[in-house]
Image (cartoon, helix red, strand yellow):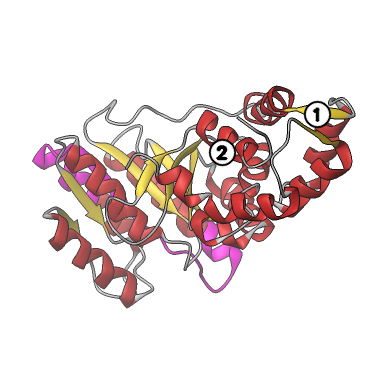
């Protein structure tokens, strides 16, 4: 998995390199503004950053400024995984963001840690989602709880948590629907799922994680904000970062949501996921501009 985050930023780095041309020792504010805006960093963040920087900006100054976005955003901490048994993750996000694939990757990580896993196919509105999750469960050799299409997703969540508890399973990951007929219906459903998980196991779900598609830009952030308003999110996993030159959206995600980014997912394979590391991300971003 090492280097996956760097690989996922290749398009972003290439776009910065195209603006910068030859790497240099310092950069002007005007040049930096173009780079930051082109990379899809929200303009308010760019303005605040530029105000605190000198007219001629060196590598260390920019590294510190970019890193401060992560450390000054009041990002709350997510529960430490496996701190309880079973540990329950509830996965939330719009259709197409990569929820089901991300669930498979999380299950794969848990198995590599020697943990037993059960998956809950809580997106009962889409046959494809249930089928895909069942296929992943078979491939990974883990258990899955499924139901007929249109069934109450909260009952799937309850059965998943209950099965994990009764069978002594370490880790449960539950999928949810990304879209219903109205925002109100979706909110009520998600709230019910959370209540049912708590009923099955006090404290569950231990993390409510939003899957954010990096290629969707500001709309993805707005979607996550809506989910956060519905049930209160605990963390974020960013997908498809390799498919965009706008990797700067990571800064906007952190500032706007105030949530920790747990992982970056790239590709369709179970191993295509890596813990998000602030230093690596900032170093790659800055390294496209300045000489070593």
Quarter of image, res 73 = top right
Q: Is residue 182 magenta?
A: yes
Is residue 255 found left or right of 203 in the rendered image? right
Q: Quadrant of the N terminus?
A: top left
Looking at the image, residue 223 lies above or below residue 130: above
Taking the image as shown, residue 289 lies to the left or right of residue 90, namely right
Q: Is residue 84 left or right of residue 46?
A: left
The quadrant of the image that shows the C terminus is top right
The reply to whether dot 1 and dot 2 touch (C-beta < 8 Å) is no
Q: Secondary structure at mark 2?
A: helix
Work out whether mark 1 precedes mark 2 in sequence or the reverse, and give the earlier one.
Answer: 1
Q: Is residue 17 left or right of residue 200?
A: right
Q: Along the line of sight, which residue is nearer the eye, 111 or 230? A: 111
Is 219 or 166 nearer to us in this picture? 219
* Mark 1 residue crowding within 10 angstroms, few (<14) / some (14–19) / many (20+): some
Image quadrant assignment for residue 51: top right
The residue identified by callout 1 is 57
| Residue neighbourhood size for the residue with mark 2, other residues' Cα within 10 Å, grouped as few (<14), some (14–19), many (≥20) | some
Q: Which residue is at a point 35% across and 61% down the rendered structure image?
A: 100
Q: Is residue 148 visible?
A: yes
Mark linked to residue 83 = none
| Rendered position, 150 above or below 14 | below
The x, y position of residue 289, in whole percent, is 68, 40
Per the rendered image, the range of residues in magenta is 160-187
Percent coordinates x, y for residue 86 in the rendering: 22, 35
Q: Residue 102, percent across and down?
A: 36, 54
> How far across and down, in percent of the image, does residue 84 sit?
26, 28
Residue found farthest to the front: 22
Q: Which of the 4 image quadrants contains residue 33?
A: top right
Above or below, comparing residue 54 to residue 290 in the picture: above
Secondary structure beneath disc 1? strand
């Amino acid at each position: 998995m090492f280097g996956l985050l760097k690989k996922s930023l290749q398009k972003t780095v290439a776009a910065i390199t195209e603006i910068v041309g030859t790497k240099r020792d310092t950069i002007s504010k005007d040049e930096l503004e173009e780079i930051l805006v082109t990379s899809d960093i929200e303009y308010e963040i760019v303005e605040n950053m530029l105000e605190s920087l000198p007219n001629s900006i060196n590598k260390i100054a920019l590294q510190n400024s970019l890193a401060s976005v992560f450390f000054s955003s009041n990002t709350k901490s997510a529960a430490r995984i496996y701190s309880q048994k079973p540990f329950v993750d509830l996965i939330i996000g719009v259709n197409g963001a990569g929820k089901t694939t991300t669930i498979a990757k999380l299950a794969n990580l848990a198995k590599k840690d020697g943990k037993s896993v059960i998956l809950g196919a809580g997106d009962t509105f889409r046959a494809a989602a249930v089928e895909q999750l069942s296929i992943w469960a078979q491939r990974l050799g883990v258990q899955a709880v499924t139901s007929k299409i249109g069934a109450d997703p909260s009952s799937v969540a309850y059965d998943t948590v209950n099965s994990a508890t009764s069978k002594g399973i370490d880790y449960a990951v539950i999928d949810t629907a990304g879209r219903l007929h109205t925002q109100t219906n979706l909110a009520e459903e998600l709230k019910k799922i959370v209540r049912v998980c708590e009923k099955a196991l006090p404290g569950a779900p231990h993390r409510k994680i939003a899957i954010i598609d990096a290629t969707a830009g500001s709309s993805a952030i707005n979607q996550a904000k809506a989910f956060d308003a519905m049930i209160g999110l605990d963390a974020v996993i960013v997908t498809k970062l390799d498919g965009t030159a706008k990797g700067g959206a990571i800064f906007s995600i952190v500032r706007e949501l105030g949530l920790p980014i747990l992982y970056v997912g790239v590709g369709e394979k179970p191993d295509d996921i890596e813990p998000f590391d602030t230093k690596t991300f900032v170093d790659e971003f800055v390294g496209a501009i300045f000489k070593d």
